[in-house]
Image (cartoon, helix red, strand yellow):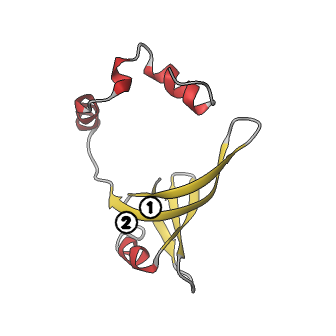
Amino acid sequence: MLGVPIKIGGEKDPVPVHLEDGANKHIISARRSLAKEIAEYLFSAVIRVEGSGRWIRHADGEWELLSFQAETFRLVENADIRTNINQLRAVQAKWKSLDDPLAELERIRRGGKVQ
């Protein structure tokens, strides 16, 4: 999950961490020691948090985050689009052999079977 930390804190461990990703805001949980590290980037940088989450899928196919427990995070570095594309091309991945990777991604998102 990506976002800029905009609010951190609470009385109990774990504490809520509010991330803003464009128009979307997500509230996740993090142990106090991790939240303290994330606080260094409050309002200033995009971070990627990794951990365990629970989602629900509504009848219309949209996903809603129910809870997310952050376990680690890392700073997302700014890079130009060419650098990002070159990094993606260098990845050794099964999807690179698919005829239509975007269609496969759409099937996965909608709950279809993976080829």
- Whether tag 2 and tag 1 are in contact, CB under 8 A, the answer is yes
Look at mark 1 in the image and give the residue it sits on. 4
Determine crowd level at label 2: few under 14, some 14-19, many 20+ residues with C-alpha closer than 10 A: few
Q: Secondary structure at mark 2?
A: loop
Say whether disc 2 or disc 1 marks the residue closer to the N-terminus: 1
Give the residue drawn at x 58%, y 32%.
109
Corner quadrant of residue 28: bottom right
Rendered view: 106 above or below 14? above
Return the x and y of residue 3 as percentages of the image width and height: 46, 57
Foreground pick, 3 / 54: 54
Give the residue drawn at x 42%, y 68%.
43
Determine crowd level at label 1: few under 14, some 14-19, many 20+ residues with C-alpha closer than 10 A: many
Residue 8 lies left or right of residue 73; in this view the side is: right
Q: Secondary structure at mark 1?
A: strand
Rendered view: 15 above or below 76? below
Residue 2 lies left or right of residue 29; in this view the side is: left
Give the residue drawn at x 53%, y 24%.
114
Q: Give amino acid for label 1.
A: Val
Q: Give amino acid for label 2.
A: Ser
Foreground pick, 103 / 8: 103
Rendered view: 40 above or below 73? below
Look at mark 2 in the image and give the residue it sits on. 44
Return the x and y of residue 105 as percentages of the image width and height: 50, 27
Residue 87 lies left or right of residue 50; in this view the side is: left
Tell me the number on the disc at residue 59.
none
